Image (spheres, rainbow, N blue to C red):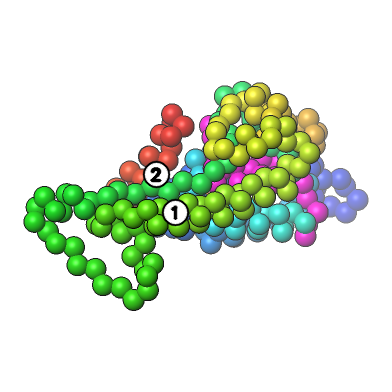
Amino acid sequence: MKRFIPFVKSDPVVSVVRLSGTIASGGRVGGVLNDAALEPVIERAFSRRRPRAVALLINSPGGSPVQSALIAARIRRLAGEKTLPVHAFVEDVAASGGYWLASAADHIWLDQSSIVGSIGVISAGFGFQELISRYGIERRLYTAGRSKALLDPFSPQKREDVKRLNELLEQIHDSFIAQVKERRGTRLNGGDDLFNGDIWIGQKAVDLGLADGLAHLVPKMKEIYGDKVKLVPYGLRRPFFQRLGAQVVNDAIDAVEERALWSRYGL
């Protein structure tokens, strides 16, 4: 109540936003992070109760580079408008797009076993042309536009298609590198090897400048803002029908894809 009483100093507030899950445009099972879903969460975190800072609890193996960029840009815009510092606390992993999110913070804090990095871009798929041929299935594909059937999984892989895909991946990779260099600046201490898609753990990541230190949310926020700091949580809620098990088939397929992302980091 004392925050409503004039001339009485209120305890400092830090908004805590949980960013846990894969990053995708939407429609997947479990925790999925995208800009549309997170917009009201992040907006509230920066606006309600006049916070002294915003803390991000990050646990993500990555996903969509576009959604990663949109979420990070929203965080930076609001941090500038509200003149608030942003702290990122990495739990198990902030890799690939997850690290893109972490780079939106002014300070990044890790557990001694947290995994960070994977500053690269990946594209994966399957080729089914031999399988369908074995069963006497003929692929019929008609296009207007020379590149319309780029990397069609039911046709033989073409060298020029792979070359074009690599060019596209390099463009996204360059954007990722630019984001990290802009946000981490002179703190980076690893040269171009930081951007080869490798990952690092705990103190090694700190030594390379990918993070600022080893720390956990509560003690670090008390150290900076005092023992009376109040941590106010904000996060996504799963839709009611999804909690009841709706869209079971789609969710099962997407769960496999999500599991594959996490398994790259032994999680």
At x 77% / y 60%, what residue is drawn? 81
Find disc 1 in the rendering and name its residue: 163
Taking 212 as reference, is 236 left or right? Answer: left
Task: Give percent across and percent down for residue 49.
Answer: 73, 53
Q: Secondary structure at mark 1?
A: helix
**What kind of residue is marked 1?**
Lys
Asked if one can make out residue 166 in the rendered structure from this viewpoint, the answer is yes
In the rendered image, the vertical position of residue 149 relative to residue 73, given as above or below: below
Asked if one can make out residue 34 in the rendered structure from this viewpoint, the answer is no
At x 79% / y 42%, what residue is drawn? 11
- Closer to the camera, 48 or 167? 167
At x 65% / y 29%, what residue is drawn? 205
In the rendered image, the vertical position of residue 146 relative to residue 58, given as above or below: below
Quick one: which residue is furthest to the front in this view? 159
Mark 1 or 2, nearer chain start: 1
Look at discs 1 and 2 and give the one toward the viewer: 1
**What kind of residue is marked 2?**
Glu
* Residue range (magenta): 81-105
Task: Give percent across and percent down for residue 45.
Answer: 66, 53
Classify residue 87 by image quadrant.
top right
Callout 2 environment at 10 Å: few (<14), some (14 to 19), or many (20+)?
many
- The answer for how far apart the CA atoms under marks 1 and 2 are is 27 Å
Q: Secondary structure at mark 2?
A: helix
- Closer to the camera, 102 or 234? 102
Taking 187 as reference, is 131 left or right? Answer: left
- Closer to the camera, 141 or 219? 141
